[in-house]
Image: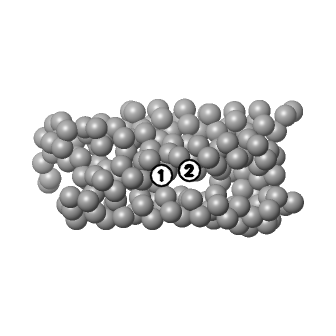
Amino acid sequence: MDLNIVFFFQVAFTLILMSLATRWWVMPRLRMLPVEQALGIVLFGGAIRYMGTILLVPAIAPGVPADLTGAGGDVLCSLLALAAILANRAGSPAGRPLAWIYVVVGGADLVLTFVKGLETGLWIHLAGGWTFVVVVFPVVVLSLVLTVVFLVRPKVASSPRPALG
């Protein structure tokens, strides 16, 4: 069977499963939080992008040169997401702008990496990194989408916070 078909089937299925879990269990809880707290949580999906440094490991894609640009872009996105998490957690006015910067840079990096992967046939050469990409790519996509959802949402929580205790 064509490896590209298997790869994209697995990515799509993971994205569907994670989207359903997000819709049914994660979003109802996130909607109860103030926007800054919800942003801090959903940005964690972008902060794990440092794992894109897997593109520097020759054993992952034998015969494919290390992708310094792709790995560097992922590290930059990870740092932007982390800065946005910390700023939102601290209640800093820089939190929302940093989250927007992450969305723009992270989205562009994701598209560029995907296009480059199509051009080079990277999926076929992933070897041990196959599962990593199949799981992490959908997390990153959902994180970007959810970050936008909470950035365009009004700052007040849509429903009161649940009472503790």
Give, as a three-letter code, the residue at label 1. Answer: Val
Residue at 34% in and 56% down: 98
Q: Nearer the viewer, residue 141 or 119?
A: 119
Residue 22 shows up from this direction: yes
Q: Say above or below: 137 vs 67.
A: above
Give, as a three-letter code, the residue at label 2. Answer: Asp
- Residue with the mark numbered 2: 109
Point out which mark residue 105 bears: 1
Give the secondary structure at mark 2.
Answer: helix
Residue 27 shows up from this direction: no
Horizontal side of 113 relative to 153 (left or right) equals right
Residue 144 x %, y %: 44, 44
- What distance separates the C-alpha of mark 2 from that of mark 1? 6 Å
Q: Nearer the viewer, residue 159 or 101?
A: 101
Horizontal side of 57 relative to 43 (left or right) equals right
Residue at 45% in and 65% down: 79
The answer to whether marks 2 and 1 mark residues whose Cβ atoms lie closer than 8 Å is: yes
Give the total of numbered labels.
2
Horizontal side of 5 relative to 150 (left or right) equals right
Category of crowding for the residue at label 1, using alpha-carbon neighbours closer than 10 angstroms: few (below 14), some (14–19), many (at least 20): some
Q: Nearer the viewer, residue 136 or 81?
A: 81
Which image quadrant is residue 52 in?
A: bottom right
